[in-house]
Image (cartoon, rainbow, N blue to C red):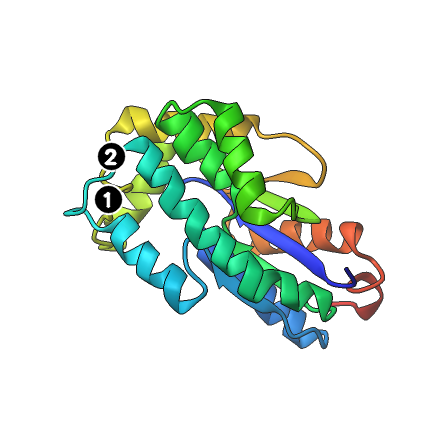
Amino acid sequence: MNGFFLVVEGPEGAGKSTLVAGLAARMRAVGVEPVTVREPGGTPAAEAIRAAFLDPDHPLGPNTELLYVTAARAHLVQNVIRPALEAGRVVVSDRYELSTHAYQAAGRGLDPDKVAYVNRVATGGLRPHLTLVLDIPPEVGRARQAAGGKAGDRLEQEDPQFHRRVAAAYLAATGEGVRHLNGMAPPAAVLDAAWAELVTAEPETFGRRGR
């Protein structure tokens, strides 16, 4: 594939959506028009799954939760992400498969090997070129959401221990293309650090264009 696949990850309130928006704006400023998506979601079918998945009045068991989120991912990869990459586009996703390991494996206690297998089925083995993980204590993230007046969805309303397991899984995440950023830094500093990682990972696309 000729495109570039960037994923932004992190626990609740880490600033993922803010960073995705900032990176997309900076990309446009240097002449790159990205395809931005979110998970679960990104297609009409996946957005319908998202609504049910996050509905506080729609209880789901751990295995059902895994299948919901990976079904939405499979549809997004097939219909948006893979075609965009094949066309040479830059794709920026707010969450991807690492979220499933953090929430369904670490958070819910599902077998990590089972989660990895279902993820491979959903993605067809498609991996990001770069994954930026925003590290932040779960208490800080939840306090940010409360201060912003955000109504908690089904996952956001989970108990503190669940969110600590999720945050710990993100903090421990390693692998090819995985880079950690300080989510406690000011948004402008986080954006600069993320852009530096992007330039390092793909200098031919971003490095020679400046900021």
Is 122 in front, or is 205?
122
**Label 1 residue SS:** loop
Look at the image and tell me in which quarter the N terminus lies.
bottom right
* Camera-side residue of 182 and 84: 84
Q: Is residue 156 left or right of residue 6?
A: left
The three-letter code of the residue at mark 1 reads Arg
Residue count near mark 2 (Cα–Cα under 10 Å), binned few <14, some 14–19, many ≥20: few
Q: Which residue is mark 1?
A: 154
- Report if the CB atoms under discs 2 and 1 are less than 8 Å apart: yes
**Residue 182 at least partly seen:** no
Would you name the residue on which mark 2 appears?
158
Residue 107 located left or right of residue 100: left
Give SS at disc 2.
loop
Tell me which residue sits at (48%, 31%) in the image: 115
User: In the image, 119: left or right of 154?
Assistant: right
Residue at image point 65% right, 44% down: 125
Q: Residue at x 14, y 47 (%)?
A: 57
How many marks overall?
2
Q: Amino acid at mark 2?
A: Glu
Asked if one can make out residue 174 in the rendered structure from this viewpoint, the answer is yes
Above or below: residue 2 compared with residue 128:
below
